[in-house]
Image: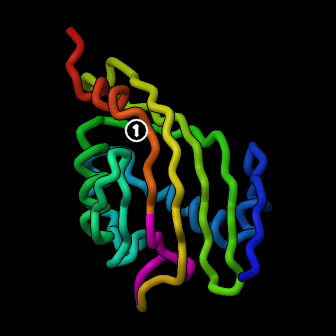
Amino acid sequence: MATSLFKVTFPLTPEAVCSHPVLGFYAAYGQAFPKTPEEWKTVPFEDWYSADCQTIQVNGTVIDGGEQSWDFFRRLYASFPKVEREVLSFIVEEDETNQVYKLHATFTTKLFADEGRRIVEVPQSFIYTLGKADPGKGTQGLQFRELRNYYDMGTLESAFAKSS
């Protein structure tokens, strides 16, 4: 298995995005990812998540299925009037033989709580495994096959608590 690894430097330029299929896919995903409750109604999960995608949660539980994973993120993020994500780093690992990629990504996610009056910043890391898209699905021939989540649930849960 021929594996290579590279770190992406920021700010990310359009040339860098076009230079690698994973970066192009993720740039499109970042643009399409719903940022408001209304947008969740219009973005189909199949554009991004394979039917058999597994999402491994912080506590080790597994969500089986792309639609179920998408629904989990919808329930998580759609309760906020706005969500912003600042990318801190990307590392891409590629298995050229099997055309499987892992994107190690770190972010600061801003959740606009209390109807946008309070911002909760959540440091998050994800490892996305991408591979060939299901027939007739995906974006740019790719879909997420697995997603591992790493973040502090206490900080995330504090965003759901109403401030007094």
Q: Looking at the picture, how far across and down is residue 78, in whole percent?
A: 27, 44
Q: Looking at the picture, how far across and down is residue 48, in whole percent?
A: 43, 69
**Would residue 144 appear left or right of 87 to someone viewing this image?**
left
Residue visible at 63% across and 82% down in the picture: 99
Which amino acid is tagged 1? Answer: Val
Residue visible at 28% across and 62% down in the picture: 63
Quarter of the view holding residue 95: bottom right
- The residue singled out by tag 1 in the image is 83
Instruction: Work out whether 132 lies above or below 35.
Output: below
Q: Looking at the picture, how far across and down is residue 33, in whole percent?
A: 43, 55
Quarter of the view holding residue 46: bottom left
**Would residue 123 appear left or right of 67 to someone viewing this image?**
right
Residue visible at 34% across and 64% down in the picture: 43
Question: In terms of depth relative to the viewer, which is nearer, 17 or 75?
Answer: 75
Instruction: Name the quadrant of the N terminus.
Output: bottom right
Q: Does the stretch in magenta take in 112? A: no
